[in-house]
Amino acid sequence: MATKLRKPILVAGMAICLLLWLWDSLHEKIIAVGEWSIWGAIALGTIFWMLQKNSSNKLTPVILSPIKRETVEEAIAQAQNEIATLAVEAPQRDIASLKQQLTQLPASFNRQTLQLAIAGSRGTGKTALKHVLESKKIAENIEWVETAPFFTATEDNTPQETALASDLVLFLTTGDLTESERQMLEQMKRFHQRIVLLFNKQDRYIPEEKEEILQQLRQRVREIILTEDVIAIAASPNFIKVKQHQEDGSVLERMETQPAQIDPLSDRLKQILSQKRDQLVLGATWREAMKLKEKAKAILNEVRRDRAIPAIEQYQWIAAATAFANPVATLDLLATATVNAQMLVDLSAIYQQKFSLSQAQTTSGTIGKLMVQLGIVELSTQTIGSLLKSNALTYMAGGAVQGISAAYLTRLAGLSAIEYFQEQEIGMASGDGLNLERLTQKLTQVFAANQRTAFLQSFVKQAVVRFQTNPSSGGAIVLGTAIKPSHKF
């Protein structure tokens, strides 16, 4: 491994000497003054570059914003609100476990025992470090937990969940971080997780390489982890060969175990646990409250989706009938937009977003524009038209393509609204504060999931049955009697 030159003063001094020599020789080389001026500028530039480089290597200290008790109490209140809403909207669901976890949260403020997680990729020395730390008396009331390896072929969320459930994470690496590891550490920091990054197996490197790797790590995580929380250790150093000369002149060789090199880590942990214990507990309690809130919200979204899908199916066939009955394309679009607006009002009520009709009309218009801009309208119409060619009777009906396209686009609009509403806090979203970027992302995702040939064929087949049953009305239906598609998304 190449070693960086770390003697800026020496280099700068040599450059200054070169500059003085050039200056002293200048009066004897007056004719070549232009050439010497160039060399002088190069020397000055070298000095400036070295000083600037040395300055850039100084790490800007990370400021860890302390989490306040009020922030944690607010998170608990949000979890309580989600669970209470779930109890009202789905009284038949068994949420006793969620309620019990919610009741236990306030007691976490006074928790005395801390859980410290030892994490890292495979082969970084997690088990060896755990054994060493357990044998030492770092502090009172400490439980050590080793996570499963990160970034394995069969990886699930278990390592991350274990790490985030702990009060502090010791993350091990045996060299520079991968980008995936850095992103994961950054995500942990966003969740108010305190991290100590450990460069393990340092004994395998020569001193210059060890120092270079340590500085690289500190530079990579300078915006995530405190410089003093990036530490080099050797939890289980390599054996060393010891030669012992005997009286008879022979030499005996044996492999001798070296003691673990974790004193800097022990000292740092003692300091953190004595000075930041309350912050560690608050951070873990906040994460626990947010996890509980997300559990309740996931169940609530499932319940609401079960109510929202039939509403979307009702409105998609209403849109189909309306478009089929209007031979003028402009009227088709206007009628579909009106149907979509009313659908958004109903969906917003299900998700407690409370859109007014004017807000829903604005949102419907926005979704329509996005569909045109993303090419969804043109692509879906062409696809539906090609599928309808297999049914000559329906294809000859001029309004069939428009009607089925209107139903399909209405379905996309409804599913996109569901995905968007699911991310919103109760009562927070409104048509005036629409996040256009997120809505575009959701619309794109929904379109990608619903343009598969199998689904479109099933969707068109249902529509054809409706048109053939009652072509004059486009298969108009009474609310509540819509046929459910065989593919759900």
Image (cartoon, helix red, strand yellow):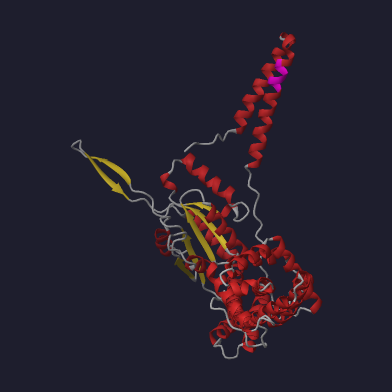
Res. 328 image quadrant: bottom right
* Residue located at (64% from left, 66% from top): 380
- Is residue 184 shown to the viewer in this render? yes
Return the residue found at the far right. 358
- x, y percentage for residue 442? 65, 67
Q: Is residue 368 above or below residue 18?
A: below
- Is residue 363 shown to the viewer in this render? no
Quadrant placement of the C terminus: bottom right
The question of residue 174 being in magenta is answered with no
Looking at the image, which is closer to me, 52 or 154?
154
Looking at the image, which is closer to me, 343 or 59?
343
Is 126 positioned to the left or the right of 24 in the image? Answer: left
- x, y percentage for residue 12? 64, 29
- x, y percentage for residue 93? 56, 88
For the record, the magenta segment spans: 35-40
Looking at the image, which is closer to me, 25 or 221?
221
* Residue located at (63% from left, 27% from top): 13
- x, y percentage for residue 178? 51, 51
Q: Is the magenta stretch mostly helix, strand or loop?
A: helix
